[in-house]
Amino acid sequence: MVSESASAYDAIVTLFLEDVGTLFVVNQKGYLAGVISRKDLLRASLGNKTLEDVPVGIIMSRMPNIITCAPEESLYAAAKKLIDFQIDSLPVVRPSEEDPKFMELTGRVTKTTIAKAFVELGSEPKV
Amino acid sequence: MVSESASAYDAIVTLFLEDVGTLFVVNQKGYLAGVISRKDLLRASLGNKTLEDVPVGIIMSRMPNIITCAPEESLYAAAKKLIDFQIDSLPVVRPSEEDPKFMELTGRVTKTTIAKAFVELGSEPKV
């Protein structure tokens, strides 16, 4: 996770340190503020500005324009969102008890999660 | 697809144009020479050199150190490789008839392919 004021450079370093493909951006209270993907960061790397000078806040997708899922959603529903919206990662969120406008992060579902589940299903469809 | 002599900058542009997460690099005869992922390109973007000056050939994974699959492999086997080797994309290849040392590209299997298959299976395991 990174904050909005982190640079795109810091975000890329964080991607490597956390070994993830998508970073979730949180506000000062720890609520979900945005999502930044490898694609967003690669796009930024094509720009004229050095990555140290590009704040995460201007290249991330920002709440409420973020596809999320709830902890009780099925993996099938989550996979369908990943495909339908052509994204790699879904933040799993629940409304804050303090202020339900804000979302608390409780996890992530990625295409890797789905691929692991597919392997665990153990079936061998000859597709 | 890009050639080894393309720059990392060109590779990123090609990723966007082809709307893929991983590029396959081919040699002059069109055989598979390497694979370059978003992760490889992001790593390059952290370097001191401008992306125009970094050739794809020095940051790609190079044959024979590439995980591939054959056209007749099951989707299950392909998904297992994606998970076991922590990669996003597998080139589907067959040995060239002209020279079996070289591999002809016939397609790709990605985590998106697997997630689509998972959705098509249509089951709703409450994981």
Image: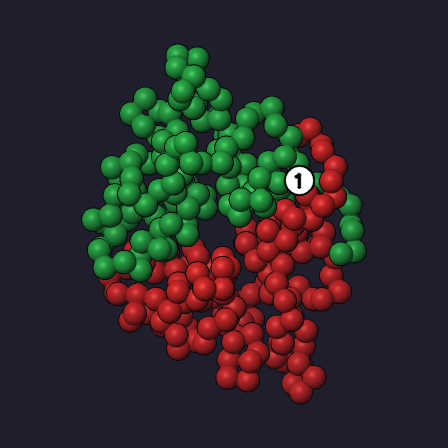
Chain colours: A green, B red
**Quarter of the figure that contains the C terminus of chain A:** bottom right
Residue under pointer 1: A117
| Looking at the image, residue B16 lies above or below residue A104 | below
| Looking at the image, residue A13 lies above or below residue B24 | above
Q: Percent x, y for residue A58?
A: 28, 43
| CA neighbours of label 1 inside 10 A, class few (<14), some (14 to 19), many (20+) | some
Q: Quadrant of residue B71?
A: bottom right
Image point (72%, 45%), residue name? B120
Residue reaching furthest to the top: A98
Residue reaching furthest to the bottom: B98
Q: Is residue B86 visible?
A: yes
The answer to whether A60 appears left or right of B126 in the picture is left
| Looking at the image, residue B72 lies above or below residue B76 | below
Q: Percent x, y for residue B40?
A: 41, 59
Image point (61%, 28%), residue name? A73
Element under label 1?
helix
Q: Nearer the viewer, residue B119 or B96?
A: B119
Which chain is disc 1 placed on? A
Looking at numbered disc 1 in the image, what kind of residue is underneath it? Ala
Q: Percent x, y for residue A34?
A: 37, 35
